[in-house]
Image: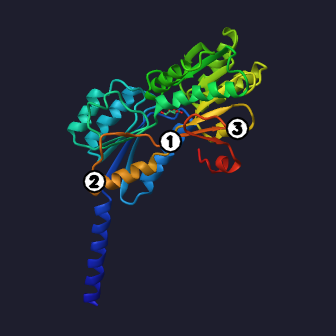
Amino acid sequence: MKKFLAVVLALALVVALGASAFADIKVAFSQIGQESDWRTANTDSIKGTIEAHEGWELVYDDAQQKQENQIKALRNFITQGVDYILFTGVVSTGWDEVLAEVNEAEIPLILVDRMPDCADKIDYAAAFGGDFVEEGRRQVAWAGEYLKSIGRGDEEVCVAIMEGTTGADAQVGRTEGNLAALKEYPNMKLVAQQSGNFTRTEGQAVMESWLKSVDKIDVLIVQNDDMGLGAIDAIKAAGKVPGKDIIIVGCDSVKAAFEAIVAGEMNCTVECTPLYGPFVEKTIEALEAGETFEKTIVHPEEGVYDCVGGIDLGTVTSVLAADVIDSRVY
Ligand code: AHR
């Protein structure tokens, strides 16, 4: 009996030691806030993946759109001695000092979504984010090509650009892409440009004010779908028909935008994936196994979705089908 108990105890000890060997990886994530459907999906993807991973513990901070909160969170992660830091910045500047501190603490840094402008000067283990300049280019190119396809390629059309949070990597890049592409379509004239802060409420408010102050808007480029959905409400309230009186091109490809496109109230959305959980998981597993990565930013998406088809942007343009909409989880 004694011998049997000793064997049971020894086995329990082995199991406990084994479990503790896997239970000591703390993965910290500094998230910007919850401004859009995209952001919610991004949080769920990363949080869900880490929490579901055996032996990994999530240390999460929601900065509520404030850079100072993110800086505090990063310093907190360092003090806690976490094993990995996942980071996306609400704006692209002002991170040099705190990210240098992360480097000094030798905590592997994984950049997700938006890149800090000091990325070249710091060490990071891996980086995954949207190609924001290209997304902005695709938005305007889609509108320009669509106008041609409906016989309005030579007509002077008035374009409004609703930008995301001022200074965010996604706003800076998409604006650069939007403006560069406008040069390719001389018939598209920029008549308004303002931030809607990536939120539905502010998108609605900016559109309401434009509808009162801007003579004519034929094309609305919104740097995320949430602002576009807010703008649709404002356009309807003003007695106009979204998607017809005003052509609307969004970005993100969230399910609500797909539904608006199918309903004819929006015309196109350019993809920007929020689903970074699986990328993060593979990266940390590889780093734990001793692998290293090249210092390069991986851009995982290339889709554009509409309801018309036949628009060639040199990328994957898909006419929305029911199964694509149904399978979208965000
Ligand atoms: O950084 C990605 C952008 O941030 C998404 O387009 C937007 O919806 C989010 O708020």
Residues 329 and 139: in front is 139
- Classed neighbour count for the residue bearing mark 1: other residues with Cα under 10 Å, few (<14), some (14–19), many (≥20): some
Relative height, residue 50 to residue 233 (above, below): below
Residue 291 numbered mark, or none: 2
Left or right of 55 in this view: 267: right
In the picture, the quarter occupied by the N terminus is bottom left
In the picture, the quarter occupied by the C terminus is top right
Residue 175 numbered mark, or none: none
As helix, strand or loop, the secondary structure at mark 2 comes to loop
Q: Mark yes or no: residue 269 visible.
A: yes
Reading the chain from its start, which is encountered first: label 1 or label 3?
1
Exactly how many numbered labels are in the figure? 3
Q: Mark yes or no: residue 200 visible.
A: no
Give the image location of residue 321, x and y in percent: 69, 46
What residue is rendered at 71% in x and 22% in y? 246
Residues 8 and 265: in front is 265
Marks 2/3 in contact by CB < 8 Å: the verdict is: no
Q: Residue furthest right?
A: 239
- Residue that carries the numbered disc 1 in the rendered image: 301
Relative height, residue 227 to residue 279 (above, below): above
